[in-house]
Image (cartoon, grey):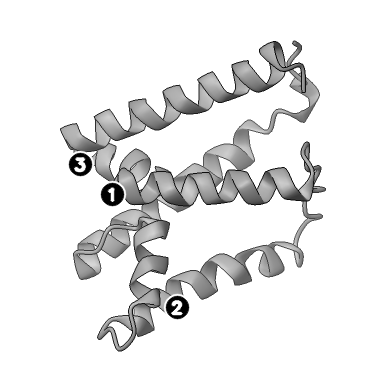
Amino acid sequence: MTIAWDAFTPWSSLAGGVLIGLSAALLILGSGRVAGISGIVGGLLRPGGPDTTWRLAFLGGLLVAPLLWRLFAVLPEAQPVAGGGLLVVAGLLVGIGTRYGSGCTSGHGVCGLSRLSPRSLVATLAFMGAGFATVYVVRHLLGA
């Protein structure tokens, strides 16, 4: 395995991380809500929720951001490494995992760890470990 150092983008990566941290901090300081995407989407699936507006605005921002980025730079090319069926199965497994783990990578990994939550540390270690193990099994044992 090699690392494509010519594709490494430290400054844009740093800027993206700062923006994610800033948005998570503003959301929790401004409304007391955690910027966990699975929780935000899950809240929209419950009919008649009183906090639908901010959830839609947050998700709208996620969808509009790449469109704004296109005004200033070329979007990176998406290169899926699996077929559609495998991607659907993987997405369903991630969704199930976020339900069992009471949150997702953004909720536990970004917001929970920054609040020094022990539960989020355990959840983050669990999903990172599961991800590492899955990649190892799929690429090295199954040869896919």
Residue 23 visible from this viewpoint:
no
Q: Name the residue under label 3.
A: 115
* Residue 23 percent across, percent down from the top left: 39, 58
x 36%, y 55%: residue: 36
In primary-sequence order, the first of circles 3 and 2 is 2
Q: Residue 57 carries which label?
A: 2
Q: Are marks 3 and 2 in contact (CB under 8 Å)?
A: no
Q: Do the residues labelled 1 and 3 touch (CB within 8 Å)?
A: no
Marks counted in the figure total: 3
Q: Between 86 and 132, which is closer to the camera in this rendering?
A: 86
Give left or right: position of 112 versus 134. Answer: left
Q: Is residue 136 left or right of residue 82?
A: left
**Camera-side residue: 26 or 81?**
81
Reading the image, the residue beneath label 1 is 102
Q: In this view, does 49 lie above or below 141?
A: below
Residue 138, quarter of the rendered image: top right
Instruction: State the SS at label 2.
Output: helix
Is residue 135 shown above or below 98? above
Q: Is mark 1 on a helix, strand or loop?
A: loop
Q: Which of 50 and 99 is in front in this view?
A: 99
The disc labelled 1 sits on which kind of residue? Ser
Question: Regarding mark 3 in the picture, which secondary structure is present there?
Answer: loop
Q: Within 10 angstroms of label 3, few (less than 14), some, or many (20 or more) residues?
A: few
Instruction: Tell me the distance, in whole angstroms, between the alpha carbons under discs 1 and 3.
Output: 16 Å
Residue 14 location, x and y as percent?
Answer: 53, 38
Task: Using the numbered discs, state the Cα–Cα distance from disc 1 to disc 2 in whole angstroms.
Answer: 23 Å
Q: Disc number at residue 113?
A: none
